[in-house]
Structures are given as C-alpha cells and as structure tokens.
Image (cartoon, helix red, strand yellow):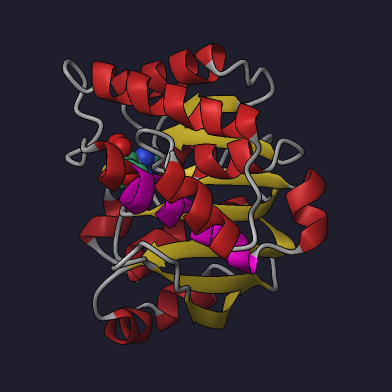
Amino acid sequence: MDLLETGAADLGVTLDRVQLDQFRLYYGELIQWNNHVNLTAVTDYEQVQTRHFLDSLTVDAVLPDTLRRSGRLLDVGSGAGLPGLPLRIAHPGLNVTLLDATAKKTAFLKHITRVLGLKDVEICTGRAESLAHDQTLRGMYDVVVSRAVARLSVLSELILPFCKVGGLAVAQKRGNVAAELCEAQVAIKSMGGVVKEVVDVEVEGVVDAAMLVVIEKTSATMERYPRRPGIPSKHPL
Ligand code: SAH
C-alpha cells in the first residue's frame, strides 16, 4: 500500500499500520468477491490504490475538521464502498452509512465491514429515491458523498434530500463538469441546495482524480422530492 500511503500523506491524511492493513485486506476481499459479484473493472494492485482508494480520499480536502472527527456521512450508490469506506478507514470517528440499490453489492459491504472490524458502519439496501423518504435517513447527514452514480441534474435529487440544512453534498465528477453544473441548476435549487465550490484536488500518483462539486444545503427539500424510483433519471428537473 505504498502508493496509497504516500498519496494520502500528500493529501494531509496520515495512515498508520493498522489502517494500511485494513486497506490491504479491503483490496484482497474486493478482488476475491469480484469473481462472482461485479464490483470493479479496476483490479490491478497499484490501480486500486490510486483510482479507488486515493481518489476516494480526495473528498477529505473539503470536509470540515469537526465533521472528520464525529460527523455523519452517507455514501449514495456506494458500490464496493467508494468513496465512503476509505473515508471511514482514514477517519475512525466518522459515522458512516453506505447505501446501494443492489443487494449483491451491499452483501459485500456487510462482509467487508465485518472483516475489517468496523462495527458502527451502517449499510442500507434500496433506491435512494425511496430511502430519502425514510424519516430516519432524510435530512440526517452532515455530508452526503457520491461517485459515478448519475449526472448532476439527476444526482442532486438523489443526494440532497438526505443532507441536513447547513450540511454538504459532495459529488465526485470527471469530464465536462461545467456543462453538467449548468444543466443541474434547476435541480440543485429545487432540492434546497447552492453550489459552494468546485475543487480540483491534485494528488501525487493520481493522474485523473475526480473533481469535487460541493453543494451546500441551505433550505429543507420539499416533501415531493425525490420523485419515484427512476423518475429523476427519466425526467431530470
Ligand atoms: N460509487 C461506486 C459505485 C459506482 S457504480 C464507485 O465509484 O465505484 C453506481 C452504483 O450506484 C451501483 O452500485 C448502483 O447499484 C448504484 N445506484 C445507481 N442508482 C441508484 C439509486 N437510485 N439508488 C441507490 N443506488 C443506486
């Protein structure tokens, strides 16, 4: 995990032996499960360190310090746990929930959190459109993160309802972010969000790190959002 260790240090995140061992274990289980569950196209030891683990840790750059120590973070469309699980490994005080619609993926998430001994990580199986109406989840998170799930006009409707007023949504994005942002203006505003910043984090060893679109939730999301499963992507606002 040398690439991860130096890259993380470059981001200001110090990983100790125990944490590096957890990442090593995570890698091994990911590759093994990937034989029967479609979790990742990237399997090479070095590439997983940079394109998955380090890319996930770039989110750290926009997390307020108090939140890193004890905040509630939700990862929507977490898949194999990215970016939520690397953030939890790096910050044991962070209270993390991983959500995905696919039961096979959440079975892996339950397995890996058990293997890593992370007892306090919550795993939710279901569509964000439905779970965002669950009163135990809606408006409950200090920060909601998401990587590679949907374009911003759709994603805003899936992630912002989970945020507390005053909380943040962080979307990891590649490609033409300006165009996506432009197209997502109505959706972001409708969910009670305001774009705070777009951050391009540079990390040693990561050629193509995702940009971070940071949205602040300034008012509560109206009850009618998110719309029914599938509607946000079929008819983006
Ligand atoms: N975030 C991970 C996985 C990206 S793949 C990564 O960056 O590697 C997209 C994931 O989002 C899939 O696992 C899929 O099951 C999940 N997903 C897509 N739409 C969703 C929705 N509406 N609600 C919940 N999960 C969703």
Q: Nearer the viewer, residue 61 or 212?
A: 61
Q: In this view, does 65 lie to the left or right of 102?
A: right
The residue that appears at 56% across and 72% down in the rendered structure is 215
Q: Is residue 166 left or right of residue 53?
A: right
Q: Is residue 162 left or right of residue 66?
A: left
Q: Where is residue 179 in the image (x, y as percent from the top left)?
A: 28, 85
The residue that appears at 35% across and 52% down in the rendered structure is 50
Q: Where is residue 136 in the image (x, y as percent from the top left)?
A: 68, 34
Toward which corner of the image does residue 122 lie, by quadrant? top right
Instruction: Note whether residue 202 is visible.
Output: yes
Q: Nearer the viewer, residue 204 or 158?
A: 204
The residue that appears at 41% across and 30% down in the rendered structure is 126
Q: Can you say whether 232 is above or below 40 in the image?
A: below
The residue that appears at 23% across and 36% down in the rendered structure is 40
Instruction: Note whether residue 221 is visible.
Output: no
Q: Can you say whether 182 is above or below 5 in the image?
A: below
The verdict on residue 58 being magenta is: yes
Q: Which of 48 and 198 is in front in this view?
A: 48
The C terminus sits in image quarter: bottom left
